[in-house]
Amino acid sequence: MPENSAGTLTAPTKPAKQRPGGTLYRGREGMWSWVLHRITGVAIFFFLLVHVLDTALVRVSPEAYNAVIGTYQTPIMGLGEVALVGAIVFHAFNGLRVILVDFWSWATRHQRFLFYVVVVLWVVTMLAFVPRHLINVFSH
Amino acid sequence: MTIATLEQPPAEAAAIESFTVTFLIRRFDPDVDTEPRWQDFDVEMYATDRVLDALHKIKWEQDGSLTFRRSCAHGICGSDAMRINGRNRLACKTLIKDLDISKPIYVEAIKGLPLEKDLVVDMEPFFASYREVQPFLIANSQPEPGKERVQSIAKREIFDDTTKCILCAACTSSCPVFWTDGQYFGPAAIVNAHRFIFDSRDDAASVRLDILNDKEGVWRCRTTFNCTDACPRGIEVTKAIAEVKQAIMRGKP
C-alpha cells in the first residue's frame, strides 16, 4: 500500500442532523410488503371507523345521513375511493400471501415471487376498476 | 525460468488495480459524544479486500480509536456483524468488489441493541433471549453404554439448516419487530430453539414450544424476511420460524 494513501481525516461532511438514527434499513420485498400491509391496514381501519360513524348517523336523523353521504359524491371523494380500493385490494392479496407464507413451505421459499404476483394482481384489479369508477365519478 | 526473472519483481503483482474507497462510518464515543456522528475515511483497497480489511487499515493507519469487534475474521465466530450500506452483513464476508465503490460505503453498528462505542453494541439482551430458549440437549433417556445417541440421516436433515447459526445477531438486529419491541425473542433465539425442538434425540421440545408460544414469542414474527436476507450462513430463518409456529399449533414437533 502506498505511503500517501492514508485517507484524510475530515470533519464529518454530513451534518449531525442528517440521519441521526443511522441509515434506513434496506430491506427487500418482504420488508416493504410488510410496511405497505401495515400502512394500508391502519388506513382501512380509520376508514371503517369513519364509515361506521357516518352510517350510524341514520339513527340520529336521515337528513343528516343524506347530507353526509351527499358529500361523498364529490370528485375529491371519488379519488379518495380509488385510494381506498387500492389499499383494500393490496391488503387483501398480500394478506393471502402472508397466509401462504406462514402455512406452506414452498411459499416461504418463494415469497419474493409471490410479492410480484400480488403486485400484478393489484395492477390488473385496479386497471379493471379505476377507469370505470372515474367515468362514473366525473360524468355525474 | 532463468535467474533473470528473479532480478525483476514479478510484473503482475504490481499490476493489480487498487481503488480509493470512501467509507462513512457512524462513530460514537460515549465519553465525548452525546449523539453518534458520521466520519469519512478514504482507504486504498483491492477488489478482493473485505470491509473488515478497510476497518483494519483505518484503525491501524488512520485512527486508532475506531472500535469494532472481530475475532476469527473468516465468517465463523460471528463477531463483526454490522450494517453495511444499510444491510446487516459480516464485515469479514463482504468483498469490496460486491459493493458500489463509486459512492461512499456506509458502515454502522447493528440496530436495536444498545450502542456502546462506534460499531460495538451491547449483545447482552440478544444472548439473554438465546439462553431463555434452553439451547442445549435435554434428554431423559440414557444412550446404550459406550454408544452415542443414534439418529438417522433423515432425522438429522430436518434441523440441519438451523445448526449453522453462529450467533452474530445479524438476523435479530435486522428485524423491524425487534427494533421497536426489544422484548421479542428475535430470529436467532427461535432458530436455536428450532435446532433442538426438531432434534429427535431431545425430549424437551414441548418446554421450548411453550416458551415460544408467548406474546413475545414466535407470533411476533411478521415474515418480513429481513432475517433470511441478512443471515451470513444462508439459514432460511423465516422458514424455521414458520416451522416452529406450525409445531406450536400441532402441539408437537
Image: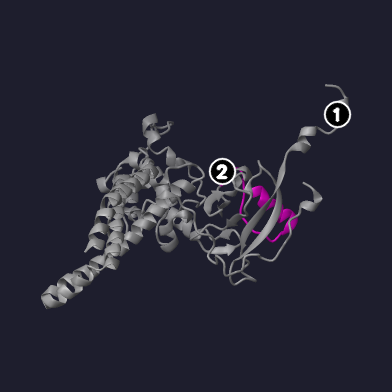
Q: Is residue B204 left or right of residue B66?
A: left
Q: Are marks 1 and 2 in contact (CB under 8 Å)?
A: no
Q: Residue at x 80, y 52 (%)?
A: A4
Q: Residue at x 69, y 57 (%)?
A: B41
Which region of the structure is painted magenta?
Answer: B52-77
Residue under label 2: B76
Q: Which mark is residue B6?
A: 1
User: Is B49 located above or below residue B103 in the figure?
Assistant: above
Q: Which mark is residue A86?
A: none
Front of the two marks 1 and 2: 1
In this rendering, does residue B13 appear at all?
yes
Residue found farthest to the top: B1
In this rendering, does residue B245 appear at all?
no
Which amino acid does the dot numbered 2 rest on?
Ile
Viewer-nearest residue: B10 or A125? A125
Q: Quadrant of the C terminus of chain A?
A: bottom left
Q: Is residue A122 left or right of residue B39?
A: left
User: Is B185 located above or below residue A19 in the figure?
Assistant: above
SS for callout 2: loop
Residue A43's quadrant in the figure?
bottom left
